[in-house]
Amino acid sequence: MLKIPPDYLPLSIQIALFVALWLVLKVLWFDPTLRIIQARRARSEGALEEARAIQAEADRLRAEHAAALDTARNEAQREMQEIVRDAEAEQKRLIAAAREDAQRTLTEVRTRMAEEVAAARQALRSSAGEIAQMVAHKILGRSA
């Protein structure tokens, strides 16, 4: 029952019991629980920092790898272009040599043919008289 004015002795005992209970619970329950929560938080934050560091390292390695690939790709392209240029130069050189050889052969053949034509004309001129006599003999039936 509620008394007015209150009885201070039981109230002070209740307050003392409450404070004692609070101190016991603080020492036995609240402080260990708070230490466990802080330790877990510290481990979690440490794990997160470690994960961030690992992610940063992975990003750095990925960027290095991409740069190395780009460098290798550019070097391969440069070498391929150089090979193509060399092949084109070799092709032009071979074509020029083939043209020169063909021109030389053509000149030799023309010269040889001109010599043969001149020799044949000379032979025909020298035997033209004989051929004319044979033709006249055949046509007229007598020697000229």
Image: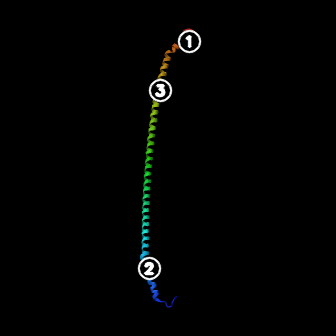
Would you call the spot at circle 3 few (<14 residues within 10 Å), some (14-19), or many (20 or more)?
few
Identify the amino acid type marked 3.
Val
Q: Say which residue label 1 marks.
A: 136
Asked if 49 appears above or below 24 in the picture, the reply is above
Answer with mark 2 or mark 1, whichever residue precedes in sequence.
2
Q: Is residue 87 above or below residue 15?
A: above
Query: Mark 1: which amino acid?
Result: Ala
Quarter that holds the C terminus: top right
What is the C-alpha distance between the residues marked 2 and 1? Answer: 159 Å
Please report the residue visible at 43 percent of the width from the left and 45 percent of the height from the top: 79
Element type at mark 3:
helix
Query: Which x, y percent locates residue 45?
Result: 43, 66
Q: Are marks 2 and 1 in contact (CB under 8 Å)?
A: no
Instruction: Tell me which residue sits at (42%, 78%) in the image.
Output: 24
Q: Camera-side residue: 116 or 19?
A: 19
- Sequence-wise, the earlier of marks 3 and 1 is 3
Dot label at residue 22: 2
> Closer to the camera: disc 2 or disc 3?
2
Q: Nearer the viewer, mark 2 or mark 1?
A: 2
Residue 109, label in figure: 3
Where does the image place residue 117, in percent across and percent down from the top left?
Answer: 49, 22
Q: Quadrant of residue 80?
A: top left
**Of callouts 2 and 3, which one flags the residue occurring earlier in the amino acid sequence?**
2
Relative depth, front residue between 79 and 131: 79
